[in-house]
Amino acid sequence: MSTLNIMIKRNTKLFFKDKGMFFTSLITPAILLVLYSTFLGKVYKNSFASALPAGLNVPEKLINGCVGAQLISSILAVSCVTVAFCSNMLMVQDKANGTVKDLTVTPVKSSLLAMSYYISTFISTLIICVVAAAICLTYVSFVGWYMSFSDVLYLLIDIFLLVMFGTALSSIINFFLSSQGQISAVGTVVSSGYGFISGAYMPISQFSKGLQRVISFLPGTYGTSLLRNHAMRGVYKEMGSIGFPNEIIEAIKDSVDCNLYFFGNKVGIEMMYLILSGSVALLIAVYILMNIRRSQKAHI
């Protein structure tokens, strides 16, 4: 266990000492917040306002709070996965510069080395995402705060699970990479593509029925929806208190993916947690088996 702790500390320190990796990971959520609030904020606001029944008077603060909660849930959903890929670059860098060969020559087992990469990536990513969450919540407090303490707590639990998911996913993909060029290519693909397939950039409800069914099989979709539900729960409660009909509130939930459907069947919050947690367990198991198999081949 002491060897594992040493390796975890070594990996974590190297990540935070690498100013390029660290600041790239940290600044990404802040940049997304600026871009989202600047370009997507107005689009979300106009879309929300146009969906309201004529004659229904809605406070400006409530509209801003709704849009702000939707924005931060999108940012955090993307950051938990993309930052994990940035944090996990050390695993590939060690292979690219030959450091991993030096480490495996020592009594350090390859399985222990693999686990140290996973845990250190998780720690680094979680720290950055919690900081990003603090920035996002500060933004919401200025535009329209409707979240309770339990909403914030559940939001942090969602971040914890999504970081575990992003770390496991990046560990499996980075397992096959061995050069800086491959890191850059994969990072670009993940950064540009994950937000769309998870419903963070554009609500899944706006996709075609066929694509919605395909995306409903992806665990990240449910992670985004969990963040949406807990970031916007207070907004929906306020809507109900000022006289919004339940049908309108449910329609809004459908439009922003707070309500998700699997082949026409509504997926509950508990089931979303079960899907995301099960996916994390499955991905970690696959990562462990991959490293065990590589270790066995190395000894043949």
Image (tube, rainbow, N blue to C red):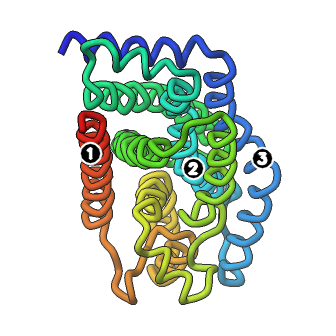
Instruction: State the residue position of label 3.
Output: 35
Classify mark 1: helix, strand or loop: helix
Instruction: State the residue position of label 2.
Output: 78
Give percent across and percent down for residue 22: 61, 22
Q: Write down the quadrant of residue 276 in the picture.
A: bottom left
Left or right, 17 with respect to 260, comes to right
Q: Are the two marked residues, 3 and 2, in contact with CB atoms closer than 8 angstroms?
A: no
Tag nearer the camera, 3 or 2: 2
Instruction: State the residue position of label 1.
Output: 293
Q: Write down the quadrant of residue 256 in the picture.
A: bottom right
Query: In the rendered structure, which disc, 3 or 1, sits on the residue that comes first in sequence?
Result: 3
Left or right, 164 with respect to 249, comes to left
Q: How far apart are marks 3 and 1 (CA)?
A: 43 Å
Q: What residue is at 32 percent from the left and 52 percent from the top?
A: 283
> Which image quadrant: the C terminus?
top left
Tag nearer the camera, 1 or 2: 1
The disc labelled 2 sits on which kind of residue?
A: Val
Classify mark 3: helix, strand or loop: helix
Q: Distance between the residues labelled 1 and 2?
A: 31 Å
Q: How far apart are marks 3 and 2 (CA)?
A: 13 Å
